Image (spheres, rainbow, N blue to C red):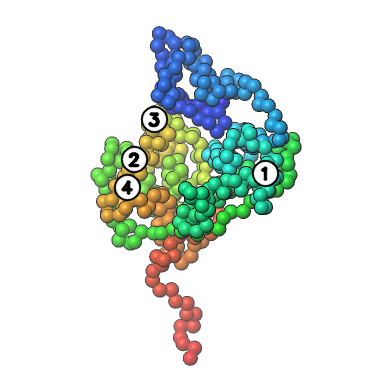
């Protein structure tokens, strides 16, 4: 069990993959906690004990003081369950014992996503789903997966879906869930995490052998040059934004860091002043690892890029100058964006950003529903521009921080926007 203080009276409780926000108040010396709009009495004058009472009420079996289940779950008659595996993976995340695909520690979101996808496929409580159930096949597919697939690819009348836009959409969801579910039983986990468990090897092989559906990839669709210029003009003027000076600047920076440097959303939120560096060729942005930063009630957590390797991206001089001019300290870990109070979780900023994104598109006559992935869209515009200027995907791949060039070409590059004429004529004259 972990607790995180969000503000003076608000706390975030976490138990495994579950989280809950709790507000503590005092009345006549006793603590009350509120969650989900309901206030309940903790019947104690001690804050830590009040949080323990709240955690016990919300999560049931977990005690904040002991950080252990009050009672051990009964062994499943079918042997090892999916919950057993999920618990081992969560423990590995908390201890930092395992590394992710890029060599960085497993992230909280990664572990939560695997557990959620396993629950979607199992269709019930993971503690009630034995791993051995996946050894029972239905037409070559594990029975739980066959049931999940049958339910997912059916319309309202129960008729199977085999073609069409709805099939493509559900196929993408299916592939995502299957990929995450298979990650629960990665080969490297079998000995390191589950070595002392009596795993059903037939079931393990059946899960590892699951295949994804073939679906069409829409690819990335770039703005027209006219539309992109209009959008740039909108986000150039901070007076087009709503809110205070810091809020306006946060929106402005998010647009241009994605537009001019191709940064991911998480990278923009965690960008630090020390990333700006001067070279003989001009300023660059060194996307690198960060450390925790505390200021005015806000905590910026430690973070590292998706890739274990840092990367260098050229940045326009005017954007670098604006970032450097906003410094309040000499620390290289001072954040580029400014958040305070409740906004430390970035939820309000995310809503504000999407509101301005939609406002910008509506102002220039576009339908914002056609461009739901905001930062993805701007990263795609950046990658496409770099590809066209360099005549290849290699530089764009390095700038975007992709380990595989296929990721760059498939998700962030619009080949229909190629302009100009590229003629290969080594000898400069006709052979005839």
Q: Mark 3 or mark 1, which has the lower sequence index?
A: 1
Mark 3 or mark 1, which is nearer to you?
1
Q: Dividing the picture into quarters, in which one does residue 185 lie?
A: top right
Q: How busy is the neighbourhood of tag 2: few (under 14 within 10 Å), some, or many (20 plus)?
A: some
Q: Mark 2 or mark 1, which has the lower sequence index?
A: 1
Mark 2 or mark 4, which is nearer to you?
4
Helix, strand or loop under label 2:
helix
In depth, the one of 202 and 305 nearer the eye is: 202
Mark 2 or mark 1, which is nearer to you?
1
Q: Is residue 330 visible?
A: no
Q: Which residue is mark 2?
A: 352
Q: Mark 3 or mark 2, which has the lower sequence index?
A: 3
Helix, strand or loop under label 1:
helix
Task: Look at the picture and state if 299 lies above or below 388.
Answer: above
Q: Which mark is residue 342?
A: 3
Q: Which residue is mark 4?
A: 358
Q: Mark 2 or mark 4, which has the lower sequence index?
A: 2
Q: Which residue is mark 1?
A: 134
Q: CA distance from mark 4 to mark 1?
A: 45 Å
Q: CA distance from mark 3 to mark 1?
A: 44 Å
């Amino acid at each position: 069990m972990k607790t995180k203080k969000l503000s003076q009276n608000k706390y975030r409780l976490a138990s495994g993959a579950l989280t809950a926000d709790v507000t503590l108040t005092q009345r006549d010396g006793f603590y009350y906690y509120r969650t989900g709009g309901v206030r309940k009495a903790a019947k104690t004058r001690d804050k830590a004990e009040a949080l323990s009472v709240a955690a016990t009420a919300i999560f049931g079996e977990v005690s904040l003081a002991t950080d252990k289940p009050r009672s051990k779950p009964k062994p499943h008659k079918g042997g090892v369950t999916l919950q057993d595996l999920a618990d081992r993976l969560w423990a590995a995340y908390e201890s930092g014992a395992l590394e992710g695909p890029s060599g960085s520690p497993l992230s909280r979101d990664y572990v939560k996503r695997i557990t959620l996808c396993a629950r979607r496929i199992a269709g019930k409580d993971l503690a009630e789903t034995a791993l051995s159930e996946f050894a029972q096949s239905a037409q070559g597919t594990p029975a739980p997966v066959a049931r999940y697939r049958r339910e997912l690819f059916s319309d309202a009348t129960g008729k199977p879906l085999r073609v069409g836009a709805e099939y493509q959409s559900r196929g993408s969801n299916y592939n995502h869930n299957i990929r995450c579910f298979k990650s629960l039983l990665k080969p490297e986990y079998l000995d390191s995490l589950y070595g002392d468990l009596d795993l059903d090897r037939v079931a393990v092989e059946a899960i590892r052998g699951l295949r994804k559906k073939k679906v069409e990839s829409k690819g990335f669709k770039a703005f027209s040059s006219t539309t992109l210029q209009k959008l740039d003009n909108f986000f150039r003027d901070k007076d087009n934004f709503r809110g205070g000076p810091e809020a306006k600047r946060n929106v402005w920076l998010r647009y241009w860091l994605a537009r001019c440097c191709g940064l991911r959303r998480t990278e923009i939120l965690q960008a630090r002043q020390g990333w700006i560096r001067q070279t003989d060729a001009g300023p660059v942005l060194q996307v690198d690892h960060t450390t925790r930063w505390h200021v005015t009630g806000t905590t910026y957590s430690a973070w590292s890029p998706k890739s274990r390797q840092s990367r260098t991206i050229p940045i326009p001089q005017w954007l670098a100058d604006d970032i450097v001019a906003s410094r309040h300290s000499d620390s290289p870990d001072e954040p580029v964006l400014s958040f305070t109070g409740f906004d430390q979780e970035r939820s309000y900023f995310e809503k504000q950003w999407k509101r301005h994104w939609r406002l910008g598109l509506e102002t220039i006559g576009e339908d914002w529903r056609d461009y739901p992935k905001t930062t993805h869209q701007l990263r795609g515009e950046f990658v496409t521009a770099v590809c066209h200027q360099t005549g290849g995907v290699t530089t764009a791949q390095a700038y975007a921080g992709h380990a595989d060039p296929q990721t760059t070409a498939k998700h962030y590059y619009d080949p229909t926007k190629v302009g100009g004429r590229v003629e290969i004529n080594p000898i400069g004259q006709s052979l005839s």
